[in-house]
Structure formats: C-alpha cells, structure tokens
Image (cartoon, grey):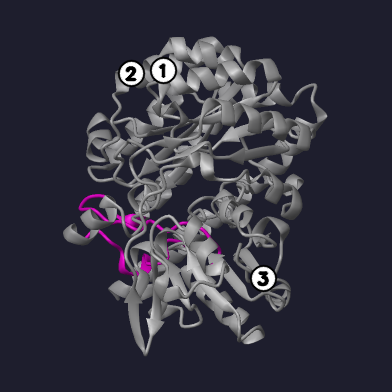
C-alpha cells in the first residue's frame, strides 16, 4: 500500500442556510433550514487512509476556521457546484494562501463539465475531476503523478491538459461503507430536513438513473443513466450496522436517484429491512405499482420523495419526465390509502411553461395533496439538456449566471415569451401560499403537532424559517423589479 498524503475533504463554507451537503451542493437556500449528508465526499474519504472530512455549512464553520484546519494537510479536495463555484474558488485561494504547498483539487459536476474554464477561474486549484471522482481522489491522495491519473484536468507549462476519461464505476460492492466517516467526522444532530424525522441518516445503495429528465444534473454529468447498485445482502448488512452505530437515528433515507427504478430489488430490500424494525424513506417516481407500495409500507417505509414537477402533461413531456398525469393520480391515491407520506417536488419555468400551466400545477399539487412540498425554479445547470436548450433558444438571463443571489435565494434563470423571470419568481410565493394556507392542510399540520412536543418545537422553528424565506423572496422580487425599471429608463 502506498504512503498516502495527509488528505482533507471539504464542503466549503458559504452563505447562511446553504445546503452544502447535497449531492449537487443545492442551488439555493431551502424553504426551511435543511442539510443533507455529504455522501459524495464521504465515499472517497472512506477510501483514503487517514483522511478527514469537514462539512462546513451544517457545522456553521467559517472561512477562517476551515482554512486554519487545512494548514495541517498535504492534499485538500473541495466539492463545488455551479451556484457555489465563485465562492469555492475564493476558498481555494484562501487555502493556498494558508498552505501554499498543499495540492488543491475541485470535484463535482460543474468542474466535470467545464474543466478548462474552472481551472482558469480558480487559479488556486491544481487539478479538477472529470466524471466519477472516487478513485481519482484515491490516486491523487496516494501521491501518483497527476499526469498519470485518468479523469482529471490540470496545468502543465502554462497550458491546461486533460487526461483520458475514467471508465464508469460498475462494482458498487467494492466501495467501503461511509458509516465510519459519518461517525468520525460529522455531527449527526446538525443534519435535519423538513420532511424527515430527526435525527436522520442518508446514503446511497447505487448510482445512476434510467430516466432522461432534461433538468436533472447528476445522471447527465456524473452518475449516468445506468443504475448500478449494491446487492440486497450488502444493503441489509449495512443497515444492521447503521442501526447499531447510530441508535439515536429515527429515520434512514436512501438517496439513490430513484431507488424504485428496479422494482424486484426494492421489494427485496424492503423485505430485508422489515424485520430490523427500521423507519425508512427513499426517492421514487410517481409510477410505483400499488403492490410494490404495499410491500414497502409493510416493511417500514414511511415517506417517498417524489418529483411530480408539473400538473401539465405537455410540460412533463417537454422535460422528458416519462410520467403521465393519470398514473400520477393513481399513485397519489394509492399512497394516501396506504398511509405513505409523500414529499412532492415541483419545478416552475420548464420549456412550455405559461401562466396558465403554472396555475394548473398549483391546482394539481393541491389535488395530489402531498404531506409537504418543495417548489423550485428551473435551474439550467451546465451539462444538462435544459442548459443546451436555453443556450440555443436564448432563454438564459445574463444576470443569473450563478443561479442565486448573494443571500442564496434562487434566481429565475430563464425567460420565455409571455412568461418572464419576474413572473416565474413571484409564482413560487403564490404556490406555497395556496398550498399551505388551505384550511385542510393547516389542520393536517396542526394535527401532527398535537401530542408530540418535539414535533411542535420543530414545526414552530420551521414556520419561522418559512416566513423568513418568503420575505427574502419578496425582497429579491422588489430588487429585480427595481433593476428592470432602471434598465428601461
């Protein structure tokens, strides 16, 4: 075994409330303060002996604090994304200032799609990854010359050089568990989510998604469209270990892009989890057969995170969602009848969107009545088909390159004839108000608080954060309107 460089993996500090742990370093502040586990960094951290993972946002760490910690390391690997890239490039420069001899690399979808541009805009970075970066990180940390490592771009004699592409990883069983990294480096209570029980734990059992949604970042850039996964035996063994290691955890979330892509496997996984007495949740498309839902519910499933996205069939077709409204209605009905909670996500501003289709989607969300919702604006990440469409059709707003403002509130990045960015931005506020301020929904949420002091405390906190979020959105709307007026005069 080679002598490994002393290696630090970092999700860099950024603006208040930024979900730095999500797979894509989520593009904005969420409606309520939430943090996902940094699984994409934890995986290579579990493979590099003696490494450490710092997840700055949930721990509330500052530039100064993390840069000071980085002084002691020879190899520093930062996770970045499109909305956080400029911030992360500044942090890389700060790290180099504190530790000039350190080998600094950037990983993530953004640098994988734009490696040359990323190196030009982040001069403190010595290399960036292209494609899946787990084994790339291991080889860099082993001291192997960068020029001999597949899947990187780096500088050589003033020029940017790319090495051969790294093959997609097929053997998921070869990965060590991330549980030891979680216990060693993360503060479990700091990870919470508006729709999962607290504390929770999340990780992947596989990578890739067979769906072809035009907006979805990771399948089009890193994970691919081939769903590769660990064996059911491996998943069951890890869950037994996770339960023993983290007895305080109330819910386990499987963060595979779509765990239900393989119906026989998800049913078998469920049957193995049932006897363990675990409460668990996962991502799913709104087309899971009722028989499968019954198996999952009978074996500990509590909630599904479901991308409904739109209530208009043509908009769904335009984004290549691969779902039909009649199937979605049947799925939602089955979930309600079986007692399966649903967190529904929606996107406004996809191609074909109009003021009328937005109102259709709001009505549809109220009809489906998931437990909770998340409403996002279409985010054209580089590397996605949506970004290509936006460039070709002139839909991109020039001022929204970073996707978020300085407070982390998401910009409306696209503009269509008859539906401008301001209209889309204002529709998010309307969406939330119409969905949550219905008497039926308000009574439902109140009912969940009665009799459970912890739930009540949490909902009150989330309510305060939610109204603060809406105020921030109104501030952004006012600022955008002022800029528009100034530009026209």
Q: Residue at x 53, y 12 (%)?
A: 295
179 in magenta: no
Question: Does residue 155 lie above or below 248 as drawn?
Answer: below
Q: Which residue is mark 2?
A: 327
Q: Is residue 245 left or right of residue 324?
A: right
Q: Left or right? Give the position of 169 relative to 318.
A: right
251 relative to 474 in the view: left or right: right
For disc 1, the neighbor class at 10 Å (few under 14, some 14 to 19, many from 20) is: many
Which of discs 3 and 1 lies nearer the camera? The answer is 3
349 to 293, vertically: above or below? below
- Residue beneath disc 3: 6
Label 2–label 1 contact, CB within 8 A = yes
Determine the residue positioned at 70% across, 36% down. 459
- Furthest toward the left, the residue is 392
Label 1 sits on a secondary structure element that is helix
Q: Main secondary structure of the magenta part?
A: loop
Q: What residue is at 62 percent from the left and 79 percent from the top?
A: 95
* Quarter of the figure with the N terminus: bottom right
Q: Is residue 401 visible?
A: yes
Q: Is residue 401 magenta?
A: yes
Q: Is disc 2 placed on a helix, strand or loop?
A: helix
From the image, tell me which residue sits under label 1: 331
Q: Which residues are magenta?
A: 394-421
Between disc 3 and disc 2, the foreground one is 3
Q: Which mark is residue 55?
A: none
- The CA span between labels 2 and 1 is 6 Å
């Amino acid at each position: 075994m080679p002598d490994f460089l002393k290696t630090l993996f970092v999700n860099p500090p950024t603006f208040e409330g930024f979900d730095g742990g999500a797979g894509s370093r989520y593009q904005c502040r969420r409606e309520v303060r939430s943090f996902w586990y940094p699984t994409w960094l934890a995986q290579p951290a579990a493979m590099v002996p003696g490494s450490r993972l710092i997840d700055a946002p949930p721990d509330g760490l500052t530039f100064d604090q993390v840069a000071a910690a980085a002084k002691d390391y020879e190899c520093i690997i930062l996770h970045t994304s499109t909305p956080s890239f400029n911030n992360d490039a500044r942090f890389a420069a700060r790290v180099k200032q504190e530790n000039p001899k350190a080998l600094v690399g950037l990983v993530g979808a953004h640098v994988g799609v734009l490696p040359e541009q990323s190196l030009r805009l982040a001069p403190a970075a010595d290399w960036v990854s292209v494609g899946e970066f787990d084994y790339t990180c291991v080889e860099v940390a082993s001291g192997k010359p960068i020029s001999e490592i597949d899947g990187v771009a780096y500088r050589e004699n003033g020029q940017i050089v790319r090495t051969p592409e790294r093959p997609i990883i097929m053997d998921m069983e070869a990965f060590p568990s991330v549980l030891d990294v979680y216990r060693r480096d993360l503060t479990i209570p700091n990870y919470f989510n508006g729709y999962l029980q607290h504390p929770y734990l999340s990780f992947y059992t596989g990578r890739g998604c067979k769906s072809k949604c035009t907006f979805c970042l990771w399948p089009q850039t890193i994970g691919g469209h081939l769903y590769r996964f660990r064996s059911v035996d491996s998943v069951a063994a890890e869950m037994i270990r996770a339960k023993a290691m983290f007895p305080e955890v109330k819910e386990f979330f499987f963060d595979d892009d779509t765990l239900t892509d393989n119906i026989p496997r998800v049913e078998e996984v469920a049957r193995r989890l049932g006897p363990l007495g675990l409460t668990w949740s996962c991502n799913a498309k709104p087309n899971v057969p009722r028989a499968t839902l019954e198996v999952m519910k009978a074996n500990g499933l509590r909630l599904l995170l479901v991308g409904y996205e739109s209530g208009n069939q043509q908009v769904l077709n335009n984004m290549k969602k691969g779902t039909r409204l009649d199937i979605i209605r049947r799925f939602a009905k089955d979930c309600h009848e079986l007692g399966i909670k649903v967190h529904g996500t929606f996107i406004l501003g996809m191609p074909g969107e109009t003021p009328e289709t937005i109102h259709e989607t709001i009505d549809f969300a109220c009809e489906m009545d998931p437990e909770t919702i998340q409403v996002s604006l279409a985010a054209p990440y580089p590397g996605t088909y949506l970004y290509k469409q936006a460039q070709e059709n002139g839909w991109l707003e020039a001022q929204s390159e970073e996707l978020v403002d300085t407070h982390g509130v998401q910009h409306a990045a696209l503009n269509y004839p008859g539906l401008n960015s301001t209209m889309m931005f204002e529709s998010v506020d309307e969406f939330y108000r119409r969905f949550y301020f219905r008497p039926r929904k308000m009574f439902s949420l109140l009912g969940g608080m009665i009799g459970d002091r912890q739930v009540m405390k949490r909902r009150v906190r989330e309510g305060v954060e939610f109204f603060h979020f809406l105020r921030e959105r109104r501030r952004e709307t006012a600022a955008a309107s002022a800029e528009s007026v100034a530009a026209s005069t």
